Amino acid sequence: MNNKKIFPFLLLAGTLLTAGSTNTQAQQTLTKEISQEVPSQKGSLIRLVSTARKVTIKPWDQAKVKVTVELVYDTAIPRKNRTDAEWFEDMGINIKPFSNRVDILTGASVSGVSSLPLKTVTVAGYRQQNPIKRKGEKGDVIVEGYRSGTPKEIIVKGFAAKPAIRVMTILVPAGCKLDLENKYGDVSIGMNVDEAKLEITNGALDAQDIKDLKLVGNYCNANLGNIEKAEVEFTNGTFRAQNINDLDMDSKSSTIEYEKGSYLYIRSQADHFSIDAIDKVDGRKVYGSIKIDQLNNSFDLEGNNVDIKFRNIGQDVSLIRINNKYGDVRLPVKNLKNYYVDFIGNYSTVFASFQKEVVKEEEKKEGEGDAAVKEAGQAVTVTRYKIGTTSAVGEVAPRHFTSANGDTKGKHTRIELTCHSCTVDFK
């Protein structure tokens, strides 16, 4: 290769690198705090739509909403003598007050082409036969010039990034309602709320007490305080709370944990529930598990491949009804004085200290030895008794048995369990 062709190219590359290094060193990263206020009042609705930023909501004692933004920007972009309103406009944050609500709408907090003037760098060098492209952080850097025997000025055009928002803090009057949608960012609510409608995608949610909650969470980790009433749709995340009085939960592939509650209705797929104490549970579930330390009133669940475990069943529990298969079930009855068990299940292993009474089953069956009866048009009634046998892990239970303990004519706990191919522990 001709050395005369190699040298100009190396000279140009070295010049570009030197200029880029000098320019990078000259640039500095600064932080700035800006704010904007709009009038509001107690009980108003605060509506926020945000993307890719951390949001913190706090109460204060003034009749207005204040939005404060902490941002980081580069001194390579001229930003002197800009007002806070101009900063908000440049970052795409729009605050609109209405008579009974305040809308805060924001764009994505990502780097992009700025509306402000771009910074240019001038270097000297030779242009090759074709335009030279160098890969930069924000895209291709195109070197434009003219081929000549003497060096020419070459303009390198780059990209300027918008300022990055670190935290957005929103101060609202006490007693406000929230309607919030946030993607790819965390949300912290440092106040008690009467009504909240929240949608969190790919982020964390931290909140205090909420009276009426509607939550949609996708790839979300939620930590809440005390909830009076909640409707929750939750997918691929972790949901934790203190006490939830009334919960309607529609969830998939998640972990649900809370301390105490009065009522839970579930529609669940491949979830793991853990509750310290609950009065009443209804619903349906496939795959996963549900663990309850203390059941106080009733439990009614349709399931498939579900592990169900109670640590303690209260004396006031009136009904436990489970229809399941391919699961492990633990129903300790040792602390119950009066209870009645009605079990149906094929190929199930049952551990129990009580006596099982096998239920007679009558079937209409056509057999080879009943030809004469068959010709006469009469049905054959067969009474079958299935006696349990002992296996290495427990007793293979009869298909259908019952058991009664104490006074079952008055107030007692009724356990109706249908579980095929299950392992059941009544101890």
Image (spheres, rainbow, N blue to C red):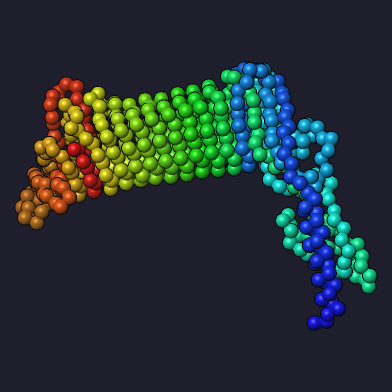
Question: In this image, 115 relative to 350: left or right?
Answer: right
- In this view, the residue in front, 263 or 25, is 25
- In this view, the residue in front, 303 or 189, is 189
Q: Name the residue rendered at 47%, 42% in the picture.
A: 237
- In this view, the residue in front, 333 or 25, is 25
Q: Position of residue 411 (x, y in %)?
A: 19, 22
Q: Is residue 9 visible?
A: yes
**Image quarter of the N terminus:** bottom right
Q: Residue furthest bottom?
A: 1
Image vertical order of residue 116 relative to residue 180, above or below: below
Q: Quadrant of residue 168?
A: top right
Image vertical order of residue 139 relative to residue 60, above or below: below
Image vertical order of residue 138 relative to residue 50, above or below: below
Q: Position of residue 364 (x, y in %)?
A: 14, 46
Q: Quadrant of residue 163?
A: top right
Number of numbered discs:
0
Q: Quadrant of residue 342?
A: top left
Question: In this image, 177 relative to 81: left or right?
Answer: left
Q: Name the residue rendered at 41%, 37% in the picture.
A: 256
Q: Name the residue rendered at 61%, 37% in the picture.
A: 54
Q: Name the residue rendered at 86%, 63% in the picture.
A: 144
Q: Position of residue 314 (x, y in %)?
A: 25, 27
Q: Is residue 364 visible?
A: no
Q: Position of residue 216 (x, y in %)?
A: 52, 36
**Image quarter of the C terminus:** top left
